[in-house]
Amino acid sequence: MILINGESKEHIEVSDRGLQYGDGLFETIAVKSGQAQFLNRHLQRLNAGCSRLLISPPDNKLLKNEVASLANQADRAVVKIIVTRGAGGRGYRQPDVVKPTRIVSLHPYPDYPNSYQQQGIRVRFCATRLGLNPTLAGIKHLNRLEQVLARSEWHDPTIQEGIMFDSDGYVVEGTMTNLFFVKNEVLYTASLEKAGVAGIIRSVVMEQAALHGMKIFEGRVSRDDLLSADELFVCNSVIGIWPVRQIEHQQFLVGPLTRQFQHWLEHFEDKGVQNEQ
Amino acid sequence: MILINGESKEHIEVSDRGLQYGDGLFETIAVKSGQAQFLNRHLQRLNAGCSRLLISPPDNKLLKNEVASLANQADRAVVKIIVTRGAGGRGYRQPDVVKPTRIVSLHPYPDYPNSYQQQGIRVRFCATRLGLNPTLAGIKHLNRLEQVLARSEWHDPTIQEGIMFDSDGYVVEGTMTNLFFVKNEVLYTASLEKAGVAGIIRSVVMEQAALHGMKIFEGRVSRDDLLSADELFVCNSVIGIWPVRQIEHQQFLVGPLTRQFQHWLEHFEDKGVQNEQ
């Protein structure tokens, strides 16, 4: 099921700048019991991203209704929103009249085994680097070749995620997740001022950490920092929080703070959905 | 007129990875007297780009026929080829079976005044930087938000191009062109190992310079290098070569070597087309 500018369709114009230049952004939203999770936060990030890319954001009431109409059809699912600068011309200059394209689509929930959340996952280091670009950093935009190439580096189904470095060699995030680690009860994560996607669950994790008085370090993180961590986890809107039990050949225990964050996230989700009504 | 995988259509599936992730590449080809210019070079670059992005390149004979069938319809026009990794799933991992999408479209030739080629153009410096990424550098891929944002920085119609720096502050290229300058009879251009698009006309210019015994410097180029040049020009497949007569407030003369390259390019084009028959 796909809604394009409110109409049920499965195709867009070839001239859409989303295809021509990756000129747009997206949100990937988990659906539980027919309800879109963290919808207000997703829309807030979408609006902020549109503002940075100079695209008029879609009417949020309209978008909420469209998301709800798809989410209602499913118990457990994923709703994806794409907003592009719309159709227009050949050339990077935006057309004089921009009519953004709004795409809302419903997808099956990926069938990840429960063990990923409970016992943790194996991850690897990717060779593909993230370029540094403050203008685009943090935005969930449609220019995702770096992630596609990083994800193409491995085929081993026992490895669930790849960790990406920036072009200066610092750790940024997973191909589809943000990355946290704990060392001496301090929570560490990479700053996303020059590369990376500012994830919704990342923001929830950091808020919960602050709320519970944890020390947080958000800055430059090295490979060695990561490998000397007490515990690690990755997160995104669809998977929630997955502990990391192995990076390359090094093993990690699933730690108490990772469990705490999983608990806080579950608890928070319920409140979040109520707040969004 | 648009051919999608050989069929006349104007729409693609929303699930196409070209839209979802900018997961593909393109070529922009000038048509003169119904003939696609430098077609072999364009296909060679397309194949090389497909290889680096791990996309099976389209059958080149087929593609040549499709390009010719559109080019034949026009005297002066532009043909654009887009190749994407095709439709497939939600997630960066490529689907197990990849069926690339091949799009060939015909566009009007942009109505640039002759003065751009004859008297030269005004250019500005862009604030939007190009991120460094050796994995993607040189490829004419579909992740073009940097160029779109750079082009959105100015609306003054008397400025025809913007010069972009990389995240380290070195000059790379124009938003839609490659950039050359001449100083003491040496030809300078930025190395494209970490950022930028390896243009077809750029390759022709460098070959012609080598053929005629000119010294060529391809490496790190600074803003000051540029501003102290004897002559400058930008180039791409559609415009050919445009002299630069002004950068910001600084004026330049259209130099003899720029005229020489324009002459060589015109001469070379004719031969190029014959070789491609």
Image (cartoon, coloured by chain):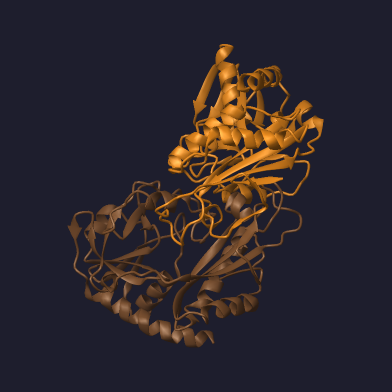
Chain colours: A brown, B orange
Which image quadrant is residue B75 in? top right
The extreme top residue here reads B213
How many marks are shown on the rendered structure?
0
- Up the image or down, A93 lies above or below B78; here it is below
Name the spot of residue A64 as percent of width and height, x first: 59, 78
- Up the image or down, A150 lies above or below A51; here it is above
Closer to us: A138 or B39: B39
Name the spot of residue A269 as percent of width and height, x first: 42, 82
Name the spot of residue B88 as percent of width and height, x first: 48, 57
Query: Is residue A230 visible to us here?
Result: yes
For the C terminus of chain A, give its image quadrant. bottom right
Which image quadrant is residue B210 in? top right
Taking the spot 43% from the left edge, 41% from the top edge, the residue there is B135
Name the spot of residue A55 as percent of width and height, x first: 65, 61
- Residue A5 in the figure: left or right of residue A260: right
Closer to us: B182 or A261: A261
Query: Is residue A91 visible to us here?
Result: no
For the N terminus of chain A, give its image quadrant. bottom right
